Image: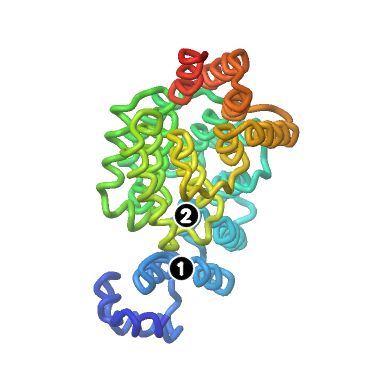
């Protein structure tokens, strides 16, 4: 860190001002005479390196002996760093009273970690969330909001989109009860990301555009929540994806630029998501230069737009995906109908989109059917 500070001409006095502490306190942090909290170290890496340094943060979490804070757990979740989240949860559990039967925030984050790692199915995730919500004596504003957010995630997986929109709007009104500024903003971003996801699919374009623009115009969102910031960019790209290539491409390219700058080097899953969105937008508009084709479904989408041999290869890929997953999703059905130029399959794809509550992307199937010849 010292070398990076010299390289970027950052003085310890500058850090002291940002943290609101004395230069001596910062010196003691670097000299290890002062136990630095997890969240403060996380923010320190952003100041020194210009963005969060996940490797340094992981090393710190492995060695630190101080009690893990909820803010640090939320940071790990928001930035997709499951290794840091697991380290913090294990640290917190060691410090907690084993005789306390009430639900703790550590319990809530541990359940969400299991969801991220695919270690719990949606039914169990929802049931355990509901069980936690019954612990009224152990409930406070933070736990209440977090468990409601967990319910929103479960509803999304169960395709109950109508329930989520009203729940999210109502939940935003309760955030003022959360005293910690970072957590209040983090939970707000979580709720808004869910609203963007379901709102776009419900064709609530005006509402979603407003929410997404508010997010990308707020420097604090970029500063503290780069993943959520790109969520908003991806939402705007999706809103325009089917009709306006220039606008859609403009927003997804901003997300790609952030990825190329190294913002998500420790979050491979999020990089794949950005690349897949970029590919979808460009393939849909037959702009084939510079595609990533890292995701199998988008590779098949690309081949489905090609010659006869390409389309046959697309069908092979899509059949393999269906066999692997044990079912066929609406997008795979759409790509398959596209590759086979099959109107009846496309009718099924349209129904699948509608049954999933996705009236945005169902327009893909509807447009194909209306222009079929």
Q: Secondary structure at mark 2?
A: loop
Spot occupied by residue 3 in the image (x, y as percentages of width and height) = 40, 85
The residue carrying pointer 2 sits among few (fewer than 14), some (14 to 19) or many (20 or more) residues within 10 Å by Cα, namely: many
- Please give the name of the residue rendered at 57% of the width and 18% of the height, measured from the top-left corner: 346
Figure check: 27 above or below 39: below
Query: For residue 18, which quarter of the picture?
Result: bottom left
Figure check: 252 above or below 148: below
Q: Secondary structure at mark 1?
A: loop
Give left or right: position of 90 versus 363. Answer: right
Spot occupied by residue 118 in the image (x, y as percentages of width and height) = 65, 44
- In front of the other: 184 or 237: 237
Give left or right: position of 159 versus 42. Answer: right
Spot occupied by residue 96 in the image (x, y as percentages of width and height) = 58, 58
Spot occupied by residue 85 in the image (x, y as percentages of width and height) = 55, 57
- In front of the other: 177 or 283: 283
Query: For residue 83, which quarter of the picture?
Result: bottom right
Q: Quadrant of the N terminus?
A: bottom left
Q: Number of labelled discs?
A: 2
Residue 124 is at least partly visible in this image: no
Could you say which disc has been placed on residue 53 in the image? Answer: 1
Q: Which residue is mark 2?
A: 79
Could you say which disc has been placed on residue 142 in the image? Answer: none
Figure check: 206 above or below 174: above
Q: Earlier in the sequence, mark 2 or mark 1?
A: 1
């Amino acid at each position: 860190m010292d070398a990076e500070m010299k390289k970027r001409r950052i003085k310890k006095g500058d850090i002291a001002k940002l943290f609101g502490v004395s230069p001596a306190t910062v010196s003691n942090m670097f000299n290890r005479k002062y136990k630095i909290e997890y969240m403060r170290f996380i923010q320190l890496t952003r100041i020194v390196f210009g963005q969060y340094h996940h490797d340094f943060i992981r090393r710190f979490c492995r060695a630190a002996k101080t009690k893990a804070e909820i803010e640090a757990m939320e940071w790990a979740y928001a930035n997709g760093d499951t290794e840091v989240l697991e380290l913090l949860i294990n640290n917190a559990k060691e410090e907690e009273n084993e005789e306390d039967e009430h639900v703790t925030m550590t319990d809530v984050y541990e359940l969400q970690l299991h969801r991220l790692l695919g270690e719990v199915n949606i039914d169990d995730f929802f049931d355990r969330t509901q069980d936690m919500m019954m612990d009224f004596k152990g409930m406070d504003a933070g736990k209440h909001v977090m468990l409601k957010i967990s319910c929103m995630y479960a509803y999304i997986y169960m395709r109950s989109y109508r329930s989520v929109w009203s729940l999210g709007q109502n939940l935003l009104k309760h955030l003022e009860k959360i005293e910690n500024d970072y957590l209040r903003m983090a939970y707000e971003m979580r709720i808004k990301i869910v609203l963007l996801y379901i709102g776009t699919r419900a064709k609530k374009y005006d509402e979603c555009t407003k929410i997404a623009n508010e997010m990308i115009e707020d420097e604090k969102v970029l500063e503290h929540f780069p993943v959520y910031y790109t969520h908003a960019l991806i939402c705007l790209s999706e809103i325009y994806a089917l009709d306006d290539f220039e606008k859609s491409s403009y927003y997804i390219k901003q997300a790609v630029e952030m990825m190329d700058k190294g913002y998500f080097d420790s979050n491979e899953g999020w990089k794949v998501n950005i690349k897949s969105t970029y590919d979808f937008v460009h393939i849909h508009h037959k702009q084939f230069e510079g595609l990533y084709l890292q995701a199998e479904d988008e590779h098949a989408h690309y081949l489905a737009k090609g010659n006869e041999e390409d389309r046959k290869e697309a069908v092979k890929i899509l059949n393999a995906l269906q066999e692997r997953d044990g079912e066929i999703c609406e997008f795979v059905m759409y790509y398959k109908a596209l590759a086979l130029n099959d109107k009846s399959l496309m009718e099924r794809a349209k129904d699948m989109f509608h049954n999933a509550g996705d009236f945005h992307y169902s327009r893909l199937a509807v447009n194909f059917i209306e222009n079929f010849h």
